[in-house]
Amino acid sequence: MKRDFMFTSESVTQGHPDKLCDRISDAIVDRLLQQDPYSRIITECAVSTGIVFLAARFDSSGKVDFTNIARKVIKEVGYNQPSFNSKTCSILTSIEELSTKEQQNFDEKQLSDAEIEQITVKNQVTVFGFACNQTETLMPLPIWLAHNLAQQLDRVRQEQILPYLAPDGKTQVGVEYRNCQPHRIHSLTVIASQDDPSYPDLKQLQKEIYETAIEPAFATEAIRPDRETYIFINPDGLVVPGGPALHSGLTGRKNAIDTYGEYAKHSGAALSGKDPIRIDRIGAYAARYAAKNIVAANLADECEVQLSYTIGQARPVSIQVETFGTGKISEEAIIQQLQQHFDFRLAGIIRQFNLRFLPSLNQGKFYQQLATYGHMGRMDLEVPWEKTDKVLAF
């Protein structure tokens, strides 16, 4: 295994077209679950210049205006440009009501263990969870820093520190590793968009992005840019206006950003736009929960948990663990501990994380908050899969 290397991860702001689609999709999931926690909903979104397309299949007693939710999210994100805004964009919909399937219309809180065993998954998927000791959140440092930088770029725009910024933006952070541990910041890239092509010019933009976004984002980090760090701010010039007028967006197209920045494996399935019955979404949360508790319990410095599900089965048909040579006990022993102390069954995950009721407990905004800055490592939100409450079980 290579011990000295450089690794980069990217993140994007709320106004990136792909993330705008994720946020719209999850806002619809939130709204339906807030009204009816037992709602079934699969929703996807696509955006381009002046156009939003929504495709949804649902079964719910809730009443939702899909187009109104999309317009509200577009406005909240900050799009008010002539080329794309909440008032004038065209919204096309393809909406289908599903018939209720008895097996999936259950109250997990009332089920016995034997009954939970009878709730099988309806999708086949292999999901991955990962954790490492590179950061306090047990996330890989490159994606952690890229998210922080994207969040600060959004904050600079939202708080009108740089009022000329448009919602679309990208960040990338490259970290140099020595002996498999972060050593220094190799490179930083920030792509910021603006509404007015005449102001500011590129030189002013670069100076102000560095002062208001990059410096604050790294102010409290143990590893910061040094004199040899490559810093690129809009290296190809001004981006005007950015967003759907420049490039299209689609729900679920930023899986690496949603998970571990490609430092570790992730499923090809989208996380956003799905209710908690979808094992390809919540299985990824359960795998992260397991991996994080393993590292927090000091059983390994790095850990990847793989769960493979097949249609018609309640439990994963395979549980695999990889500790990359950092395990304090064997991987087989860790798997035995997972099987003993963690419930990876569909209804068991829903019950333990209270996934159906999180939107109503968070004023109708839970899943949409995950749509930007990652679904994992979110210590700014109270997400149940980030808890380390299983440490004493090992």
Image: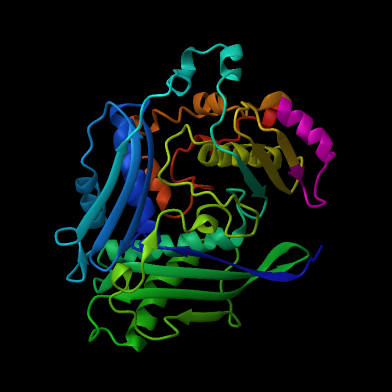
Dividing the picture into quadrants, the one containing residue 2 is bottom right
Which quadrant of the structure image shows residue 317? top right
Q: Relative to 238, say whether 257 is above or below.
A: above
Instruction: Check the picture and name the quadrant holding the C terminus.
Output: top right
Q: Is residue 78 visible?
A: no
Residue at point 38% right, 46% down?
A: 369
Where is residue 340 shown, x and y percent of the image? 72, 24
Q: Is residue 329 magenta?
A: yes
Residue 365 x/y as whole percent? 32, 40
Q: Position of residue 81 (x, y in %)?
A: 20, 69
| 16 left or right of 325 in image | left
Left or right, 134 with respect to 189, comes to right
Residue 215 lies, in percent from the top left, at 45, 71
Residue 24 shown left or right of residue 375 in the figure = left
Q: Please, which residue is most extreme toward the right here?
A: 330
Q: Which span of residues is magenta-colored?
A: 321-339
Residue 311: which quarter of the image? top right
Q: How many marks?
A: 0
Residue 316 magenta-highlighted = no
Which of the two residues, 180 or 240, is positioned nearer the viewer here? 240
Q: Is residue 350 visible?
A: yes
Q: Quadrant of the N terminus?
A: bottom right
